[in-house]
Image (tube, helix red, strand yellow):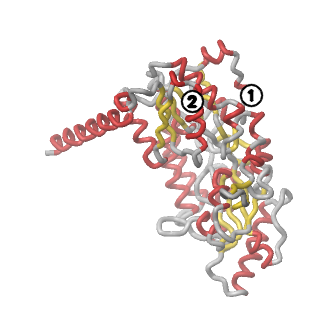
Amino acid sequence: MERAFRFAMLGLVLTMVALWVLVVGRVGRPHYLIQYMIWDDNRGVIRQIVDEWNDAHPAEGVQLVVTPWDGYWDKLFATMVGKQPPDVFWLSPEYREPYIEKGQLLDLSPYIERDGFSLDDFQPRELVMNWMMDGKVHGINRDFDTIGLFYNKKLFDEAGIPYPDETWDWDRLLEAALRFKRHFQATGQPEKWPLDIPAWAQGGWLNLVWQNGGEVLGADKQSLTLDRPEAVQALQWQADLVFKHGVSPRGGPGTIGGLELFRAGNLAMTYNGSWTCRQVAATEDLDWDVAVLPKGKRRAVVTNGLAECVARRTRHPEACWRFVQYLVSQECQERLPVIASRKTATGAWVPSNADEREADGKKAQRIIPEHGQAFIDMLQYARAKPITHDVLEWNDILDNYIGMVLISGSLDAAEAMRRAAAEVNPILQRRP
């Protein structure tokens, strides 16, 4: 019975793969030379760029396929299994390993060398190097992001607390949070919270660990080092915001996230990414701004970004390479609603996204806040998340233990990280 069930499930999977290939594979795009798969059209900017390419290159037409993040990775995997992948597509660093190991990505280094294409024109360097392995280049970094301290100016004004700036450190952050707690209690506003730092790495705890001098992995990437004092102290400091000081809401299933609380006007401060600026700006009657992250023993912030990659199986590598060069060109990069990786286009993010206008030319809303340049200023001390061969596997284990510290409070940081290291280290020490 079990064996029959397995065969039935295998047949179902293969059928789904075949249907996906028929829908978005080459069978479904006879008049397009290139298929370009992404997970966000960036409010139509990518569609405009593709349309302009198609107008200028009718013989090398591009079909844009937008698949939301939640389904993107399953569909991309299905096309790879079906041997009909999109020609050009987005990858983020943590998902790169399986595709590189299985030889699914075209090595771009011969084209880069031949055409004098300079990777030195792109930043941050760590993200650019994410795609360089064993003398091969598997993708061109497109954009990057950083994490900032979002704050509600109205709530700060009501509480009489000065706005955060580059002088803030952890002590000032906690002091302000405690002042807000007393203010909300005294004014009968139990629905409001002082501060939220997310319980996920990029948006929250990893910034704190680095700021306190801790590391996730050892230098050889074969051991988890979150069980060492610097990292444990940072994680416990974040947990104490919830369970000791009561200045941060408890997270987990069924709770309202920090971004939602902030947009509702019920959160004074939150850590969040540059990519959420447009979403926050769309909130009516929200007077807000952003500052660089408060520092610990040192300054640090997590950066991440995606790359334009080409499938090794593409039938048109030269056309794909020309298209990728266009995507990361000065002209296209300056128009992105995210921070461009090309150095000469990075600074365009603030002025080109400063505001959106209605059809009659009336200013509708400011997209980038007054101090939005802070996201770019933090680049000088930004760091990329550590990536290893089995990062997705050990990240799942780590996330579970991080949740016990920051969400449920069922374990203190020291014990949780001791247990996490015991499970993660054997995975890190496996050889691919």
Q: Residues within 10 Å of mark 1 (few under 14, many from 20)?
A: some
Report the residue marked by disc 2: 55
Q: State whether residue 174 is above or below residue 45.
A: below
Report the residue marked by disc 1: 121
Residue 228 position within the rendered picture, expressed as x and y whole percent measured from the top left: 66, 49
Quarter of the image with the N terminus is top left
Q: State whether residue 60 is above or below residue 370.
A: above
Residue 51 position within the rendered picture, expressed as x and y whole percent measured from the top left: 56, 35
| Comes first in the chain, label 2 or label 1 | 2
The residue drawn where x is 55% and y is 64% is 407
As drawn, the label of residue 233 is: none
* Residue 43 as seen in the image, left or right of residue 214: left
Outermost residue toward the left? Answer: 1
* Residue 297 as seen in the image, left or right of residue 15: right
Q: For the residue marked with disc 1, what is the amino acid?
A: Asp
Residue 427 position within the rendered picture, expressed as x and y whole percent measured from the top left: 49, 38
